[in-house]
Image (tube, rainbow, N blue to C red):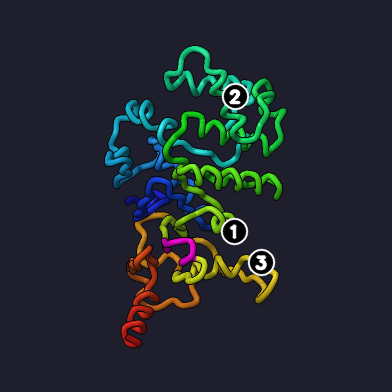
Amino acid sequence: MSEHHVHAVHDVDLVIREGESIGIAGESACGKSTLGLSLIRMLDGHTAETDGSIVFDGKDILQMPEPEFDDTYRWRRISMIFQGAMNSLDPVFTIHEQFAEILARHGHIGDCEELIVRAVRSVGLDEGVLAKYPHELSGGMKQRVVIAMALLLKPQFVIADEPTTALDVLVQAQIISMLKSLKEQGMSFMLITHDLAVLSEIADTIGVMYGGQIVEFGSSQEIYTNPRHPYTQGLLRSIPTLKGKPPSYIRGSPPALFGEPSGCRFADRCPHVMEQCTRSPPKFKTDTGYAMCWLEEEHDEQAGQRA
């Protein structure tokens, strides 16, 4: 890869099962949104290069011709709640017109009024919002509209990119409650967020991203009670609590992602950095996930000695 390229997402390997919710956490510019956009194939093909495979129900959707993916998968089977609701809505069309456009684009003809009304009611909105323009709605209402649009065609898998960002605490709680309800109905979704507290309530599994890589992946319980990667440990220590030690922060800055990556990307900020960290970091697997850290080797050796 040329030194002028940004390696935004690298070596991500995930399995998301039917009815499972997965959380993706990490600081800004770590590749979370790029990962989500890759899954729905919405990266700009003129500026982004993709490699690998994305297998959905046994088919590699990354290799599909764009018209086939657009007609068969995008929004019908995979949809996305985009970050920043106002940026997702067209300011010159009413909410109803924007719902109708989605349905028309995907082959729905005739009277779709009942389908549209049911969609807005499913997210706790009155059908009166359909006659309004985006600027006439509050932030929370716009976010609900975007969620309703993502669910309009009843997809199997939904990618939610920061769905509670910039919303007040009450509206955040309502959105979280809505996502929990979707989970109970058996929908699979990926929740991308900075907020680890939100993930603790919703996600079955969590992937912690740093520098374009998922450096730790495991069940929610394992991530919160036994974090193995120093970056994950640092994130959890930064969360304020009512008891115990005051929150701490991770020193330093995120890595530059130009050129081919080498070694552990967290090495410059890690309090446990070792000589082998400058080489390609390993991926030590556990029963439920993995951690890309040489400390895992020491952990395994100590466990073997105790046995």
Q: Please determine whether, in this image, residue 144 is positioned above or below residue 115.
A: below
Q: What is the CA distance from the residue labelled 2 to the residue labelled 3? A: 41 Å
Residue 117 position within the rendered picture, expressed as x and y whole percent measured from the top left: 59, 24
Q: Tell me what residue is drawn at x 49 percent, y 12 percent.
A: 110
Tag 1 residue: 197
| Residue under the point 58% across and 70% down | 237
Give the alpha-carbon distance from disc 1 to disc 3, as whole Å.
Answer: 11 Å
Figure disc tally? 3
| Camera-nearest label, 2 or 3 | 2
Question: Is 282 within the magenta?
Answer: no
Q: Which residues are magenta?
A: 215-223
Task: State which quadrant residue 46 falls in.
Answer: top left
**In the image, which disc is placed on residue 276?**
none
Q: Is 266 situated above or below 9?
A: below
Q: Earlier in the sequence, mark 2 or mark 3?
A: 2
**Residue type at the position of mark 3:** Pro
Label 3 residue SS: loop
On the image, the x and y values in percent for residue 18 come to: 39, 46
Label 3 sits on residue: 240
Comparing marks 1 and 3, which lies closer to the viewer? 1
